[in-house]
Image: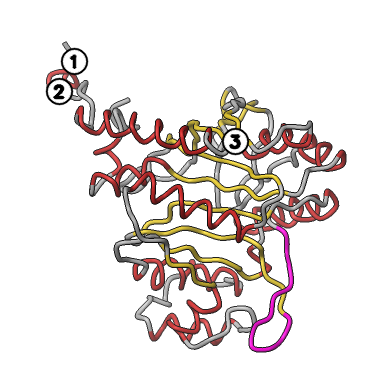
Amino acid sequence: MSQELNNNSWQPTCNVKALEERALLYKRARQFFDSRGVIEVETPLMCTRTITDPYIQAFMVDNKYYLQTSPEYAMKRLLANGCKSIYQICKAFRHDEAGNMHNPEFTMIEWYRLGFDHIQLMDEMDLLLQVLLDTTQPARKISYYTLFMENFEINPHATDIDSLQACAKKAGIDLSAAALVGLTVTDWLQILMSYVIEPRLTGPVPWIVYDFPAAQAALAKVIDTVIDTKKCPVAARFEVYMQGMELANGYYELQNPAEQTKRFTQDNAKRLEQGTKQIQADERLLAALEVGLPDCAGVALGLDRVLMLKMQAKSIADVLSFTIRNA
C-alpha cells in the first residue's frame, strides 16, 4: 500500500453534512429557476476555443482542447439559436493556485434572462441568494463610483495613475515590487478594489457592486449614465461580494460582433504584454452574434463559495468532496 493511502489521503475533504447541504443548494436553485420558467441546459466542458480574458487562464487537454472557464460562449450560441431564458449548473476550470478560496475545478450556476438588463438581473440575483442563504434581508446595492468615493474620495471614471498610486500608498500597499511597473489605470483600480475595498464588503448581507469603468466592460455593453451631473460611459455589469469574497459576475450582454472582435483583439494585446499565451477568437460565438444575440443579461455565481457562506466554512476544501490535492 502506498504512503498516500497510509496517511488517509483517500478520504473526502468535506463531511457528510456538507454533501447534504450541497444537494439541498442545487435543489433550491433548480426550484427557483423552474418557478420562473427558466430552462436548464447542458453544454460541453471541453471545447476548441476558450475566453481571451488576460486575467483568466484555461487548462488545455491534449494540446488541442480547453476545459471551459465558464459555459458562457456555448450558452450564448443557444440563445442566438432561439432558446428562451436558460440556466446551467456545471463544473468550470481555471488555472489559478489552489487555496482556501479557490480550487482549479469548481461549480457554478450561470443563467441568462431575455429582456433583462444588468439592474433587473441584480434584483433576481438578490432574490436567489436570499433563497440559497436563508436570509430575509436584501443585498446592499452600490455603484463602483460610490465605493471609490467613500473609500478614496476619487472618481474612478475620471482619474489617473498618479492619483491611484497615492491612494495605494496611503492604504499601505507595497509600491516597491517590480510587478507594479507599467500598470494601467485599470490595473491600479483592480489593485485597490482587491486589497482595500473587497475586504471591507462584510456584514450579514451580500454587496452588489454595479456600473464598472468602461475599460472593464469585458463582455458587457457600455452605456451612458449620469455621474456628478455629467454623462459618463460605464460598463453595464455587476459583481457580488459577501464576507470579502467575490461570488458572482454579471453583464448586460454585448450583442455587437464588431465590438466583440475588437475586445478579443485588445485582450490578446494585453496577453502579449503580459507574456501569456494568446487565444484565438471564438469564431462560432462571433457567428452567433452575427445572426443575433437577443437582448439579455447573464451572470455566473460560484456555488462552492455560496456553500462556504451557508456552512460558515473557512476553506473551500470543507465543502468539496475532493480538492485538486487529493482527487
Q: Main secondary structure of the magenta part?
A: strand
What amino acid type should be assigned to the residue bearing mark 1? Ser
- Percent coordinates x, y for residue 150 in the rendering: 45, 83
What amino acid type should be assigned to the residue bearing mark 3? Val
- Quarter of the image for the N terminus: give it: top left
**How far apart are the alpha carbons under marks 1 and 2?**
10 Å
Q: Which residue is painted at 73% across and 67% down in the image?
A: 223
Which mark is first along the chain, 2 or 1?
1
Label ID, residue 2: 1
Q: Which residue is painted at 68% across and 45% down in the image?
A: 278
In the image, taking residue 109 as reference, residue 135 lies left or right, namely left
Q: Residues within 10 Å of mark 3 (few under 14, many from 20)?
A: many
The quarter of the picture where residue 14 lies is top left
- Percent coordinates x, y for residue 300 in the rendering: 53, 45
Cβ atoms under marks 1 and 2 closer than 8 Å: no
Which mark is first along the chain, 2 or 3?
2
Say if 233 sits above or below 241 in the image: below
Q: Which residue is painted at 84% across and 37% down in the image?
A: 287
The quarter of the picture where residue 196 lies is bottom left
Highlighted range, magenta: 221-231
Residue identifier under label 2: 8
